Amino acid sequence: MTDFILAHIHKSSKKGEKLLAILLDPDKTTISEIPSISKRIENLKANFIFVGGSFVEKGITDIFVQKLKEFTNISIVLFPGDYSQVTNNADALLFLSLLSGRNPEYLIEQQIKAVPFLKNSSLEIIPTGYILIDGGTNSSVLKVSKTTAIPQNNIDLAVATAVAGMYKGKQLIYLEAGSGAKFPVNSGLISAVKKNINIPLIVGGGIRTKEQLNNAYKSGADVVVIGTAFENNINLSI
Ligand code: 1GP
């Protein structure tokens, strides 16, 4: 097991260099699109490709990541909706705990189920506190996890949740407004969380424009994740 990706994020965070991840959902992208998609991701100078989704069929992620590897050298980080999406073909795995929810399935059960897949694995495993913030839609993560999101104005709860995650040993905090969110996580919330943790911060959900991207960066996001805007707009320039 190596720690290249987390080390990369830490180093960039210290230097104030902002990182971009493009999220690909194997349920929404076909294998035949991978060559052109890889080129588009390289043109955007993304640092990472996150791969995952809420409803991905078993075995698909494995083939999907293998194919991506043929067309790009960008690091591939698994962002799995469930344990069956774990594949050794990627570079790293966000080992997520859904800290904003109270459903044991996503706090510990899925993690236990993932262990047999991780035996002898060379994946870099990154303990990540995953926190859902209300993005104005009933997102897939909310539906699947049967949890509720933290309201955008409950900054104290979002901060306390992130700090608890850090004390529990998480190496990254991920603030998620949900894929296709109407509005991304607000700047006040991002900056309050950032001020209270000393681990890197990922922000995603509903980011569609350069302005929203820069806003998240300025507020304290070290890594921003863009999925829907990339999927829907082949001319996306950010
Ligand atoms: C990753 O869910 C996000 O955190 C991606 O959200 O699809 O809205 O960009 P979008």
Image (cartoon, helix red, strand yellow):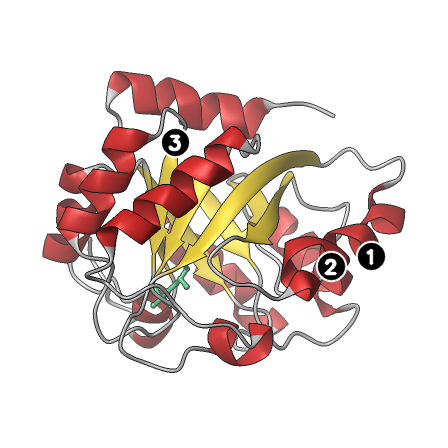
> Are the residues at dot 1 and dot 2 in contact (C-beta closer than 8 Å)?
yes
Q: Which mark is residue 113?
A: 1
Q: Residue at x 49, y 39 (%)?
A: 165
Count residues near mark 3 (Cα–Cα under 10 Å), then give few for <14, some for 14-19, many for 20+: many
Residue closest to the eye, 66 or 119: 119
> Taking 84 as reference, is 194 above or below it?
above
Q: Residues within 10 Å of mark 1 (few under 14, many from 20)?
A: some
In terms of sequence position, does the residue under pointer 2 or pointer 3 come before the other?
2
Q: Which mark is residue 200?
A: 3
Image spot of residue 70 (x, y percent): 64, 49
Kindly state the secondary structure of the residue where label 3 is placed. loop
Looking at the rendered structure, the secondary structure element under dot 2 is helix
Q: Name the residue that disc number 2 marks.
A: 110
The percent coordinates of residue 85 (x first, y second) are 71, 61
Quadrant hosting residue 204: bottom left
| Relative vertical location of residue 17 with respect to residue 28 in this rendering, above or below | above
What's the amino acid at mark 3?
Pro
Left or right, 153 with respect to 52, comes to left
Q: Position of residue 233 (x, y in %)?
A: 28, 72
Residue 120, relative to residue 14: is it above or below? below
Amino acid at circle 1 = Lys
Q: Quadrant of residue 118?
A: top right
